[in-house]
Image (cartoon, grey):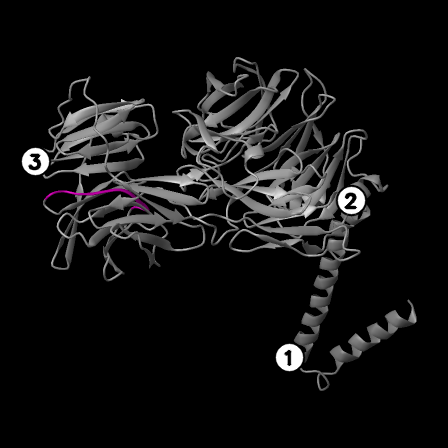
């Protein structure tokens, strides 16, 4: 026994033998201190064991953050110099200028009112005095979106406003400018439909319960009554989208499926008038007739629900209309036209798509107030390009860029073409982007791949709550027009979130999250599918035994396919071979349940963006190594024309410069998971 050990032994012997020197409390305190030191030592030792192999990989560089630009509310970007020695650095490009959205307008003889939406702000109403064109804004702090508005039939100064996200009904006296909360639903989150009968009673339609309410307001007293509407045609509907009310009946437009019903308020009978393959049945009233759109043509009815002759057509619709042109909304009210500014105000919220395009540009899109933006990769500036026609309510989930145009799958299955060569500024004409096509049974175009330079294949799924969907081939003709072919309906148990093509062999990766991250229902295990060009499943490979998403598919020049779930990496080496797993550093693999965010092709290699790390899969060595720790969690990534890696979270755009990536690539280090 050495001297230090003997001394410690004698100390404890004396302490235990002398009750007069140490009391019980001090003894307990000493024991707790010793125990605490031992626990702390165990934690430190565990961290060394846990992190040691990662540090030994030689790639655990924590990136400093350097500002390259800041974006002001008018979407102009101002350069900042990058300090010497800051590379490798995660360069903050800036927030995305998000525009104000406008989708509707209501009018009476005195006013036209446009509701405006923005990601970070409250609901704003632009009130236009039709006599002189003067505009003023009224802000409703306790609301964000309003789809249902109508003027009171008896008071031309009174506006009824039904809001979404918080299902509320407001009364607004425009001359006073102070909104008053009249009623709030306890069961619904959104009100889409609103109309007033001649008697003054208001009727509301909601989402997600598709309920219909009758609201009576009398001398400051409000009463609400649920109107029971039952019919087999609306059993699966989620929206009550539009209402036209008379004292005798209600005309009700539902979504999913799109059905038009007439409800007799006196006899409570419900009659189906028509169905449509479109997402909603659009309708409007002209005097004693109602007109509803069914698959591209108008069907007319009298107010008793009796169909009009097929050769009758609606007259000019003199209701106010609104058209989005770039960062402006043009309101047409009768023979007068008014312009409402939609210039960016808040911004930096909801970046949903990012992809590379013609040099030196990178393109992206935002959620809700859908806004196309571009990144000038030479100046490292963010610029807004155009608002989607129709304004807010659209959702770009993904899009492709072929250097000439963007084919953009978006909310409700709509596809837009946007020619980047014609949009060098923030303001674009109403024809750019332009609607190319729309698939009836698709709420989100979620995945795409190129079969040829002129042919795209898409996998869509139908709505927030369902799996399945369609496989669609879109061919671009020499004149720039497109031809769409629905190849096959995908099985109800599958939702494809990624597509890739290897030598005309089509691969698809499944999603567990139904509705683009909105609802978890199916709890699917991640599966890689091979499909033929007819949409038939040739082979399927389960990639895990617990629910997960396939988060990326990348094809290399060699034909090798790299596939990722949130926790694992796989490779298919050649046609006919099965996926084999690439080992990742096991410590990283355990750190987070949701790990791999994005796969990005980088030359003949693949960059793997995770929640905390940037990894590199080197195809030549078949090795995965850690390049750096990311100080921010990014969910989107794309390699720009300048060779830099652009990253995005919901609020900001970031860049890892090419020189940093090249330096990491050239340096020799210990590889992780080499074969």
Towards the viewer: 147 or 240: 147
Label 2 vs label 1, nearer the camera: 2
In this rendering, would 22 be left or right of 9? left
From the image, tell me which residue sits under label 3: 266
Towards the viewer: 341 or 6: 341
Residue 138 placement (x, y as % from top left): 32, 58
State the separation of the CA atoms marked 3 and 1: 83 Å
Q: Residue at x 33, y 30 (%)?
A: 256
In this rendering, would 229 be left or right of 323? left
State the separation of the CA atoms marked 3 and 2: 75 Å
Quick one: label 3 or label 2, which is nearer the N terminus? 3
Taking the image as drawn, is residue 567 in sight?
A: no
| Count of marks overlaid on the render | 3
The image quarter containing residue 329 is top left
Asked which secondary structure carries label 1, the reply is: helix
Q: Quadrant of the N terminus?
A: bottom right
Whether label 2 touches label 1, CB < 8 Å: no
From the image, tell me which residue sits under label 1: 25
Q: Residue 659: which disc?
A: 2
Q: Residue at x 24, y 28 (%)?
A: 292
Asked which secondary structure carries label 3, the reply is: loop
Residue 599 placement (x, y as % from top left): 65, 35
Taking the image as drawn, is residue 373 in sight?
A: yes
Q: Residue 235: which disc?
A: none
In this rendering, would 347 be left or right of 404? left
Q: Is residue 536 above or below residue 138?
A: above
Q: What stretch of residues is rendered in magenta?
A: 188-198
């Amino acid at each position: 026994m050495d001297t230090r050990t003997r001394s410690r032994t004698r100390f404890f012997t004396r302490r235990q033998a002398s009750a007069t020197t140490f009391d019980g409390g001090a003894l307990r305190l000493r024991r707790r201190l010793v125990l605490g030191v031992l626990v702390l030592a165990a934690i430190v030792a565990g961290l060394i064991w846990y992190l040691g192999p990662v540090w030994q990989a030689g790639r655990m560089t924590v990136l400093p953050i350097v500002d390259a630009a800041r974006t002001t509310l008018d979407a102009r970007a101002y350069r900042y110099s990058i300090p010497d020695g800051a590379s490798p650095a995660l360069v903050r490009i800036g927030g995305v200028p998000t525009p104000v959205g406008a989708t509707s307008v209501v009018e009476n003889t005195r006013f036209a009112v446009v509701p405006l939406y923005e990601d970070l702000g409250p609901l704003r109403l632009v009130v236009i005095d039709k006599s002189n064109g003067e505009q003023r804004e009224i802000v409703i702090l306790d609301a964000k979106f309003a789809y249902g508005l109508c003027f009171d039939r008896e008071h031309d100064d009174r506006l009824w406003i039904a809001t979404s996200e918080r299902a509320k009904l407001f009364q607004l006296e425009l001359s006073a400018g102070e909104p008053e909360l009249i009623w709030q639903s306890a069961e619904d989150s959104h009100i889409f439909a609103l109309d007033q009968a001649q008697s003054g009673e208001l009727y509301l339609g909601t989402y997600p319960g598709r309920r219909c309410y009758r609201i009576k307001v009398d001398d400051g007293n409000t009463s609400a009554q649920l109107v029971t509407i039952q019919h087999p045609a609306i059993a699966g509907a989620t929206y009550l989208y539009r209402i036209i009310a008379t004292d005798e009946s209600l005309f009700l437009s539902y979504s999913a499926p799109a059905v038009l019903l007439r409800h007799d308020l006196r006899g409570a009978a419900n009659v189906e008038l028509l169905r449509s393959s479109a997402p909603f049945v659009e309708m409007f009233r002209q005097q004693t007739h109602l007109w509803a759109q069914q698959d591209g043509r108008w069907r007319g009815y009298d107010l008793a629900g009796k169909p009009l002759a097929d050769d009758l057509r609606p007259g000019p619709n003199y209701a106010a209309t609104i058209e989005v042109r770039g960062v402006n909304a043009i309101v047409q009210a009768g023979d007068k036209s008014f312009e409402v500014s939609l210039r960016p105000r808040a911004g930096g919220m909801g970046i949903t798509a990012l992809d590379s395009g013609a040099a030196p540009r990178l393109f992206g899109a935002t959620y809700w107030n859908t806004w196309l933006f571009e990144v000038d990769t030479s100046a490292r500036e963010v610029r807004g390009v155009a608002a989607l026609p129709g304004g807010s309510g659209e959702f770009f989930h993904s899009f492709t860029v072929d250097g000439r145009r963007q084919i953009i799958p978006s909310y409700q299955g709509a596809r837009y073409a946007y020619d980047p060569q014609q949009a060098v500024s923030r303001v674009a004409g109403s024809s750019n982007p332009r609607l190319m096509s729309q698939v009836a049974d698709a709420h989100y175009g979620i995945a795409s791949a190129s079969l040829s330079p002129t042919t795209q294949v898409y996998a869509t799924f139908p709505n927030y709550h369902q799996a399945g969907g369609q496989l669609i081939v879109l061919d671009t003709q020499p004149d720039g027009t497109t031809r769409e072919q629905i190849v096959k309906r995908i099985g109800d148990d599958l939702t494809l979130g990624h597509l890739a093509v290897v030598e005309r062999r089509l691969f698809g990766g499944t999603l567990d999250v139904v509705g683009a991250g909105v609802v978890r229902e199916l709890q699917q295990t991640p599966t890689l599918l091979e499909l033929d060009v007819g949409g038939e499943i040739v082979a399927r490979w389960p990639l895990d035994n617990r629910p997960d998403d396939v988060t990326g598919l990348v094809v290399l020049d060699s034909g090798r396919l790299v596939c990722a779930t949130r926790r694992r990496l796989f490779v298919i080496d050649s046609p006919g071979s099965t996926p084999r797993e690439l080992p990742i550093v096991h410590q990283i693999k355990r750190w987070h349940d949701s790990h791999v965010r994005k796969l990005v092709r980088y030359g003949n290699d693949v960059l793997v963006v995770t929640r905390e790390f940037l990894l590199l899969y080197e195809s030549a060595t078949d090795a995965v190594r850690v390049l750096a720790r990311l100080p921010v969690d990014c969910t989107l990534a794309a390699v720009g024309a300048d060779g830099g890696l652009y990253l995005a979270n919901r609020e900001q755009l970031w860049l890892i410069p090419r020189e940093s990536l090249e330096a990491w690539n050239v340096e020799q280090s210990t590889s992780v998971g080499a074969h």
